[in-house]
Amino acid sequence: MSDETQATSAPAAASSESGPGSGHSYGHSSGPRTGGRPAGGPGGRPSSAPGGRGKFFRRKKVCKFCTEKIDAIPYRDVRLLQGFVAERGKIVPRRLTGVCTKHQRRLTRAIKQARNIALLPFATRH
């Protein structure tokens, strides 16, 4: 019986030599590719449902100016305009703020007017 166990264990030991230096020498590591990305869906979020959709639900953004029935956006209202300007001085896009197209155009014009008369900065100081 000992001869049979040696015969079966010898080929298994020879086939398990898949370490460095056995086979090719391309510098690749054997094993699954990780690629530096965490497991899960896009952005590293774990996906529990099929199709990559997780348990998070993104609410549809509603235009602040439409809900409050504001037609003319005042360029002098700095506190209102600062909510739509990023920390570095960039105008925040409507896909992030939820403002409709019509009001985004008026908001952009009001921010630019406020910048020109020095109510808002063009950029932060660094």
Image (spheres, rainbow, N blue to C red):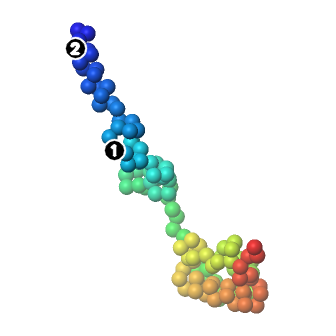
The secondary element bearing badge 2 is classed as helix
Q: Position of residue 78 (x, y in %)?
A: 74, 81
Quick one: 29 or 102, which is closer to the camera? 29
- Earlier-in-chain disc, 2 versus 1: 2
Q: Position of residue 20 (x, y in %)?
A: 40, 38
Residue in the image at 53% along x and 83% along y = 101
Q: Residues within 10 Å of mark 1 (few under 14, many from 20)?
A: few
Is residue 14 something that shows in the picture? yes
Residue in the image at 56% along x and 76% along y = 94
- What's the residue type where badge 2 is placed? Glu
Quick one: 110 or 44, which is closer to the camera? 44
- What's the residue type where badge 1 is placed? His
- Cα separation between marks 2 and 1: 32 Å
Residue in the image at 38% along x and 48% along y = 26
Q: Position of residue 12 (x, y in %)?
A: 29, 26
Q: Position of residue 97 (x, y in %)?
A: 59, 73
The secondary element bearing badge 1 is classed as loop
> Which mark is nearer the camera, 2 or 1?
1
Number of the label disc, if any, that sits on residue 15: none
The answer to whether mark 2 and mark 1 are in CB contact below 8 A is: no
**Quarter containing the C terminus:** bottom right
The residue to which callout 2 is attached is: 4
| 59, above or below 97, in the image | above
Q: Residue furthest top?
A: 1
Q: Residues within 10 Å of mark 2 (few under 14, many from 20)?
A: few
Quick one: 109 or 19, which is closer to the camera? 19
Is residue 63 something that shows in the picture? no
Residue 21 appears left or right of 98? left
The residue to which callout 1 is attached is: 24
| 53, above or below 14, in the image | below
Which image quadrant for residue 84? bottom right
